[in-house]
Image (tube, coloured by chain):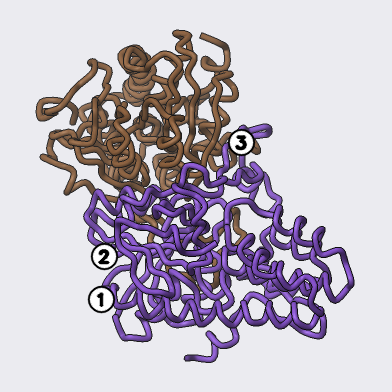
Chain colours: A purple, B brown
Amino acid sequence: MPLAHMALAPMRWSDGVLLVLDQRELPAREVWLGLQSAEDVAVAIREMAVRGAPAIGVAAAYGMALAALRGDYLAAADACMRASRPTAVNLAWALDRMRPLWGSSAARLLEEAQRIEAEDVAINQAIGRHGAALVPQGAGVLTICNTGSLATAGHGTALGIIRTAHEDAKAIRVLACETRPRQQGLRLTAWELAQDGIPFAVIADSAAGRMMATGEVGLVVVGADRIAANGDTANKIGTYSLAVLANHHGIPFLVAAPTSTVDSALPDGASIPIEERDPSELTHVDCHRVAPEGCPVMNPAFDVTPADLIGAIVTELGVHCAPYDFSDLGR
Amino acid sequence: MPLAHMALAPMRWSDGVLLVLDQRELPAREVWLGLQSAEDVAVAIREMAVRGAPAIGVAAAYGMALAALRGDYLAAADACMRASRPTAVNLAWALDRMRPLWGSSAARLLEEAQRIEAEDVAINQAIGRHGAALVPQGAGVLTICNTGSLATAGHGTALGIIRTAHEDAKAIRVLACETRPRQQGLRLTAWELAQDGIPFAVIADSAAGRMMATGEVGLVVVGADRIAANGDTANKIGTYSLAVLANHHGIPFLVAAPTSTVDSALPDGASIPIEERDPSELTHVDCHRVAPEGCPVMNPAFDVTPADLIGAIVTELGVHCAPYDFSDLGR
């Protein structure tokens, strides 16, 4: 694995502080925030300094270790981080996993957080191996948002499949959707792909249909923020549109996620909470107003893709095909 | 008609100068450029100070009048403006209409340009009347880009239908797609809708699918840059994706355009030239770099929607339904 992969991780534990790479500053600047409490972690998640469903889970686990080290009230630490973002279930999954250790030493909580982090890298590498087998030689692979090392503990989910396919000499070319409003594709995925030397181009989200119609896309692969028991999947806003378009063009549509993204308590996607984020994400760019003053906005951060539009869901366990039944998996 | 409509036009002839409202500066600032030659007009079109297929045609007609007034070589003026943007056929249509007058006085060319401008407003009002009859009471109406007064000589095409439906008390609510990369929906359509007091919200282009799935959209109406004889339609990038999504959800999809947008010489959409614009439209916002340095980009400005995804095409002549045959219409 090239050094770039090894080095690229969105957070690091260092001397009792959780260092988090501030993803709002990328790619212009590499700024590390030193988080010292669960409250700090909650703010970093809410304001998207750390983002990506698996990375949020890992950060929250470290947040519990920070709280234990400080002697803070653990139930309050848990509640504060749990409420920081509503859609990605990995956050609740990680906090649930830490809960039985509340009576243990701070060192034990830290060890568990480090284990969750290490497991996530191994899980992503397994997802990469299972998924890469489905990537056609020479394919154009379209993806959305950032699902790479920055969104996980390392390697990535959908981008992990792309990485492994590239390492397998599949001669792929990636089309990265810009991913409005926060431009994670343009800012983060482009940055990761360039570092790894994977051929790519960024497109406007609205150009995905044309790219499919003109034969540029052989496969769509996306991540997930929450997967219901029947396979319905919440992911970055725009994912559902890509699924409809892929089906219209007969292009395979894959979802990649660890089983910690499965919420088996939900029978289907209808009850997944969809976060509505601040209008300024659309109306402003870097504090600079683009829209007319007072412009009304609807800004859902996620949408739900029904299982019948998903060709396969790739987890660390393998490739799952329809009809999906995840009622015994995940949280 | 409220005063706002009357006043809002993207250009004005004044004492031998074509004043053009610089749409790159809106909504932040109202800046008028004084164009004094066909070359000035060509630059304003290429750099999108003036934009929108019908408005481009009107500007080019005035450009020929400017050339005649200066005593410039008319064939060169024609060629220079004709090459300024490739996709919208209204540009060639207007220049073709001016050509028989090359031997006439400059005053006659100016009179013809003013006639084209006045006709365009009347045409748009006819489109508005024909189209508004198709708008359901209380509908959510989704649109893309700017097709309003700014994109035409006044009133607008798709936005003209929306305006007329609003005047008819149809109680509509507009969802305006942001329209990356240049954000005409967020900047221009939002500005026009706010001025007219039409209820609306701006959404990310990628949110269109979710809005359709959650019942927010009862009708999609878009403009056109070139319509082939069989009804295939080139329009702003993202239009094709909206058409696929609308069809998936059983939502009517309308195209609104004057017959000057029809290119009857083209049997279908396959041979419509699609402009690829500068990568900086995606990688930068107002000269500020967002993407990593050297980030590769594909930036087609238009896509082609096949006729079989279009429920109806509304021109000044009425409502045209499939199978479309425009071989006797337009240019």
Per the image, the residue denoted by label 3 is: B27
Name the residue at the right extreme: A71
Q: Nearer the viewer, residue A185 or B326?
A: A185
Sequence order check: which comes first, mark 2 or mark 1?
1
Per the image, the residue denoted by label 1 is: A138
Residue placed at 83% from the left, 68% from the top? A37
Answer with the quarter of the image where residue B250 lies. top left
Q: Label 1: state its secondary structure.
A: loop
Mark 2 belongs to chain: A
Residue placed at 17% from the left, 48% from the top? B270
Residue placed at 35% from the left, 12% from the top? B129
Answer with the quarter of the image where residue B251 lies. top left
Mark 3 belongs to chain: B
Tell me how far mark 2 sits from mark 1, CA to CA. 9 Å
Work out whether A169 lies above or below B191. below
Q: Amino acid at mark 2?
A: Gly
Q: Residue B73: tell me if it is visible.
A: no
Q: Are marks 2 and 3 on the same chain?
A: no
Per the image, the residue denoted by label 2 is: A218
Q: Label 2: state its secondary structure.
A: loop
Q: Provide residue A230's location: percent of width, then percent of height.
A: 39, 52
Q: Nearer the viewer, residue B38 or A322?
A: A322
Contact check, label 2 and label 1, Cβ < 8 Å = yes
Work out whether A2 lies above or below B21. below
For discs 3 and 1, the disc positioned in front in the rendered view: 1
Q: Residue A53: tell me if it is visible.
A: yes
Instruction: Tell me the crowding category of disc 1: few under 14, some 14 to 19, or many 20 or more residues within 10 angstroms, Cα based.
Output: few
